[in-house]
Amino acid sequence: MVLHKCGNRRCCNPDHLYDGTSTQNRRDAEMHGTAPIGSRHGQSKLSEAQVLAIRKDERMHKLIAAEYGVSRTAITHIKLRSTWGWL
């Protein structure tokens, strides 16, 4: 893959480009703030506000999951901060 040192996807300056792996590409996108995360991700079912509310909710995970239309596992991961950890 060709990666951008500057973080600008449209940049075609050869001095700003380098070879890398898909893992490096993802890491660079996260570092430059261009990776779709949270509610900006196309497959996200929750907003940042909902995630914060889920973290405070003390009910059983399956009840919370039913309310928000996600799996019990998704609720567990949110509460453990293995997903949405930047919030």
Image (spheres, helix red, strand yellow):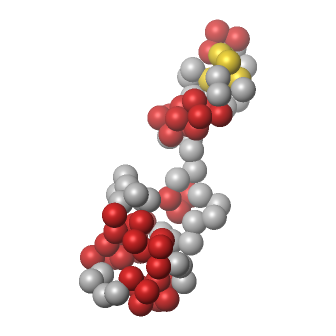
- Depth check: give the residue in front, 87 or 7: 87
| Quadrant location, the C terminus | bottom left
- Depth check: give the residue in front, 37 or 61: 61
Name the residue located 54 percent from the left edge and 32 percent from the top edge: 28
Query: Where is residue 79 drawn, in percent x and y?
Result: 34, 68
Query: Where is residue 64 drawn, in percent x and y?
Result: 41, 85
Left/right of residue 34 with respect to residue 74 in the rendered view: right
Is residue 49 among what the camera can see?
Answer: no
Left/right of residue 21 with respect to residue 78 in the rendered view: right
Name the residue located 71 percent from the left edge and 23 percent from the top edge: 2
**Res. 60 image quadrant:** bottom left
In the image, is residue 70 above or below residue 33? Answer: below
Q: Residue furthest top?
A: 15
Left/right of residue 1 with respect to residue 61 in the rendered view: right
Left/right of residue 64 with respect to residue 45 in the rendered view: left
Query: Where is residue 52 drawn, in percent x and y?
Result: 34, 70
Name the residue located 57 percent from the left edge and 20 percent from the top edge: 5
